[in-house]
Amino acid sequence: MLNDKNKNLLIYHFLVIIFGFASILGKLISIDALPLTIYRMSIAFVGLAIYFLIINPKYFYLNRSMWGKVFLGGFFIGLHWFTFFYAIKIAGVSLTLSMMASGALITALIDPLLNGRKILKHEVFFGGFAAVGIGVIYQAEFEHFFGITIAFLSAFLSALFTILNGQMVKKARPITLSFYELTIGSFLGLILSYFSDNINIESFKISGMDLLWLLILGLVGTSFAFNLSIKVMKYLSPFTVMMVINLEPIYGVLLSLVIWKEKSFLSTSFYLGFLIVMGSIFLSALYKKFRMNNN
């Protein structure tokens, strides 16, 4: 019989697989990256709004002083998902997720600059270790240079979003912040699409299968998974949460290998670079755990 911690650990692994599957859905959905992002965010915030109305309408409340940062968070998450799906469309799932894996270390390196704390030597070391892996991937898959760069930009935006949310969660409910960030991101996406020469009303037309994938992506992969992840985190240590989240790129790459056999057009050097990046993340996490236990 599983205790609460182990049961919630299994649930969290399942949720991370769902998060990884979002990249697969991004490739399955046939519409362009910007309409895809708008649909995902719109479906997700409508799903959360219905949840709030059923469970507790007080979840809609947000302090007026938070609106500036929440607007910035909506901008970051919207642009992050747009670049994420765009990279998947032009470079594939495996290459995109290999760059997204660097997000944890990007966060560790820029967080001191934004929050005014001292840069730690081990963060610089493991960040440099990850940079070597990223360099190997760039060299191995140079024909996908533009797509890899877009994916790296997406990881950078994700890091900015994570740091900003880390500041805000001390003053507001995470689920409330997400609702308004998704709402703002959706409207910003619509504004961007209005001024884009490449996007018109035809760009938003979807097939029956696209609608199904979008509903799964928005409701299951975003609203449901995010809400459940908050509840599960109450039973897990921050270290455990971080280690499991770091498995998302691995799950996503494995799924892409099974579904599309992306191995057939990715070089051995790519997987070497990917292993270096993932190794730097896990070694960094283990080092932090070691320091905590010895302080």
Image (spheres, grey):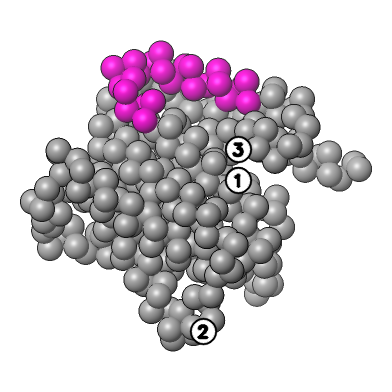
Give me the residue at 39% from left, 16% from top: 140
Query: Of the residues shown, which amino acid type is indicated by label 1?
Result: Ile
Query: Of the residues shown, which amino acid type is indicated by label 3?
Result: Thr
Query: Of the residues shown, which amino acid type is indicated by label 2?
Result: Asn
Residue 286 in magenta stretch: no
| Residue 258 seen in the current view | no
Of residues 193 and 37, which is closer to you in this image? 193
Mark 3 surroundings within 10 Å by alpha-carbon count, few (fewer than 14), some (14 through 19), many (20 or more) = many
Closer to the camera: disc 3 or disc 1? 1
Q: Secondary structure at mark 3?
A: helix
In the image, taking residue 162 as reference, residue 255 lies left or right, namely left
Q: In the rendered structure, find residue 107 and report the number of the disc placed on it.
A: 3
Q: Main secondary structure of the magenta part?
A: helix
Disc 2 + disc 3, Cβ < 8 Å: no
Q: Is residue 236 above or below residue 264?
A: below
Q: Position of residue 249 (x, y in %)?
A: 46, 41
Q: In the rendered structure, find residue 163 and report the number of the disc placed on it.
A: 1
Q: CA distance from mark 2 to mark 3?
A: 33 Å
> Which residue is the site of mark 2?
56
Disc 3 + disc 1, Cβ < 8 Å: yes
Of residues 130 and 7, which is closer to you in this image? 130
Q: Is residue 255 above or below residue 116?
A: below
Give me the residue at 26% from left, 50% from top: 191
Question: Range of the magenta residues?
Answer: 127-150
